Amino acid sequence: MSNTEPSESLITTDVETGSNEQTATPDRTAVAARDLNVFYGDEQAIDDVSMEIPEKRVTALIGPSGCGKSTFLRCINRMNDMIEICRVEGEVEFGGKNVYDADVDPVALRRKIGMVFQKPNPFPKSIRDNVAYGLKIQGYDGDIDERVEESLKGAALWDEVKDQLDSSGLELSGGQQQRLCIARAIAADPEVILMDEPTSALDPVAASKIEDLIDDLAEEYTVIIVTHNMQQAARISDRTAVFLTGGRLVEYDDTTKIFEDPEEQRVEDYITGKFG
Ligand SMILES: Nc1ncnc2c1ncn2[C@@H]1O[C@H](COP(=O)(O)OP(=O)(O)OP(=O)(O)O)[C@@H](O)[C@H]1O
């Protein structure tokens, strides 16, 4: 939330030299979870999680299967609203507001906080309409073709599809379909893009293109990504949050710190493959 003071832990200073000649710009917080608890019926999936996620950075959520990463991600844009037995307590602050406040429109929220899923899910429509569909529904009054082009460029797909915009999105390869879904999210002009294991259904070459794209996206958007692939988290993220069983956030820090010198033995054990 841009009107919130950045937390001290996110302020980068040159500790070694104490130099303040190059004053680093402190990261601003894009999304903050506060005392978040999530239940499916009687079962608790997220246990009292608080964390501030910096703007225009890549934040990775890692941890063993079932530890609540996807649940946490889905809380951020209220995708869990779709799950009847799911109950959320606590707050997720975005844009200076708790997204769970009664006056927040979840549809508008999801335009600002887009989502990309594990399996690419383009609509059975043309490439153009996949990107334009949301704009049309929204009653966008700008130049739709221009926006389609910009979004496809932003998703590093334009050069590959510019001559076939009227072909079905389903005819694209898996990696291209995933980039089309990213273009669809970008078209809505989001601030945050949530990604739930966006490369796990792709071959290594397609996955690597998405990783490069994520790096570019972070220049403009806040990216929050769930990944099972620790090398991927280490390669692409600035911050890493480690969740362990029971939906507890065990450690959250700069990615290099998490991977090179974690505070918690449990985190080191997880990262070195001793469990999970
Ligand atoms: N729709 C649902 N209904 C009931 N329980 C659910 C639902 N979704 C998740 N859970 C439970 O909540 C807990 C956390 O699941 P979640 O999918 O968030 O974990 P995860 O860390 O993303 O797992 P994975 O890495 O396997 O995708 C698990 O115990 C899971 O069984």
Image: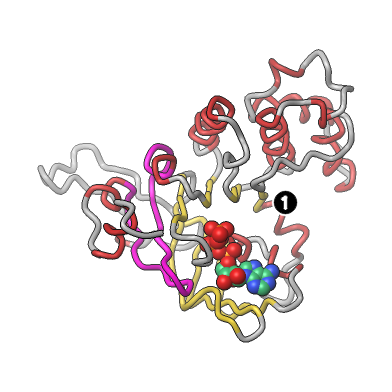
Q: Nearer the viewer, residue 159 or 83?
A: 83
- The image position of residue 252, as x and y in percent, is 36, 60
Q: Dividing the image into 4 quarters, which one contains the C terminus?
A: bottom left
Tell me where the magenta segment starts and ends, as one range.
233-255
Question: Please, is residue 100 above or below residue 176 in the view?
Answer: below
Magenta residue check for 186: no
In the visual, does 239 lie left or right of 212? left
Q: Nearer the viewer, residue 22 or 271?
A: 271
Magenta residue check for 236: yes
Residue at x 62% of width, y 77% of height? 88
In this view, which residue lies farthest toward the left? 17
Which scheme is used to colour this image of the protein? Answer: secondary structure
Residue at x 77% of width, y 30% of height? 147
Residue at x 46% of width, y 45% of height? 229
Question: Please, is residue 205 above or below residue 29 in the view?
Answer: above
What's under tag 1, amino acid-wise? Arg
- The image position of residue 169, as x and y in percent, is 82, 30
The residue that disc 1 covers is 111
Mark 1 closeness class: few <14, some 14–19, many ≥20 residues within 10 Å: many
- The image position of residue 16, as x and y in percent, is 11, 45
In this view, which residue lies farthest toward the front? 274
Residue at disc 1, secondary structure:
helix
Q: Quadrant of residue 250?
A: bottom left
